[in-house]
Image (cartoon, rainbow, N blue to C red):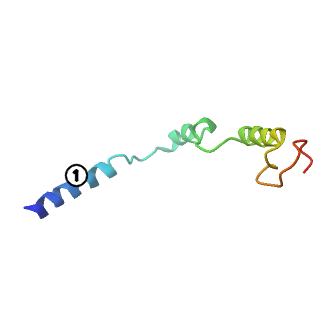
C-alpha cells in the first residue's frame, strides 16, 4: 500500500513539474528577448553601481583596490 502511495505521489509531482513547460513560437521570442524581460542587471545599472562604488570609496569597480573615493585607483 505504501509503495502505491509513493508511486502516485511521484507521478503527480512529475506531471506538475512538466506542466510548466511550453513550446515558444518563433514570433513570440521577440518579446522574451526584450531587455525588460532579462533577470540580470542592464549595462546602465552596472555602470551606476560602479560609479556609486567609486563615489562611496568602498572599493574599486568590479572588486578592485580600495581607495579614497576619487575613482583614481
Label 1: which residue? 12
Looking at the picture, tell me which residue is in the foreground, 53 or 20. Answer: 53
Looking at the picture, tell me which residue is in the foreground, 38 or 23. Answer: 38
Residue farthest along the left direction in this orientation? 1
Left or right, 59 with respect to 40, comes to right
Above or below, 2 relative to 43: below
Q: SS class of the residue under badge 1?
A: helix
Total numbered badges shown on the rendered structure: 1
Residue farthest along the bottom direction in this orientation? 3
Left or right, 15 with respect to 46, comes to left
Looking at the picture, tell me which residue is in the foreground, 51 or 29. Answer: 51
Left or right, 21 with respect to 7, comes to right
Above or below, 2 relative to 69: below
On the image, the x and y values in percent for residue 62 come to 77, 52
Residue density around tag 1, few if under 14, some if 14–19, many if 20 or more, within 10 Å: few
Q: Quadrant of the N terminus?
A: bottom left
Q: Quadrant of residue 4?
A: bottom left
Amino acid at each position: 500500500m505504501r509503495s502505491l502511495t509513493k508511486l502516485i505521489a511521484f507521478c503527480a509531482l512529475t506531471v506538475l513539474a512538466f506542466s510548466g513547460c511550453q513550446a515558444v513560437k518563433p514570433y513570440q521570442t521577440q518579446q522574451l528577448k526584450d531587455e525588460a524581460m532579462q533577470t540580470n542587471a542592464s549595462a546602465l545599472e552596472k555602470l551606476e553601481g560602479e560609479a556609486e562604488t567609486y563615489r562611496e570609496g568602498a572599493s574599486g569597480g568590479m572588486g578592485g583596490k580600495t581607495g579614497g573615493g576619487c575613482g583614481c585607483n
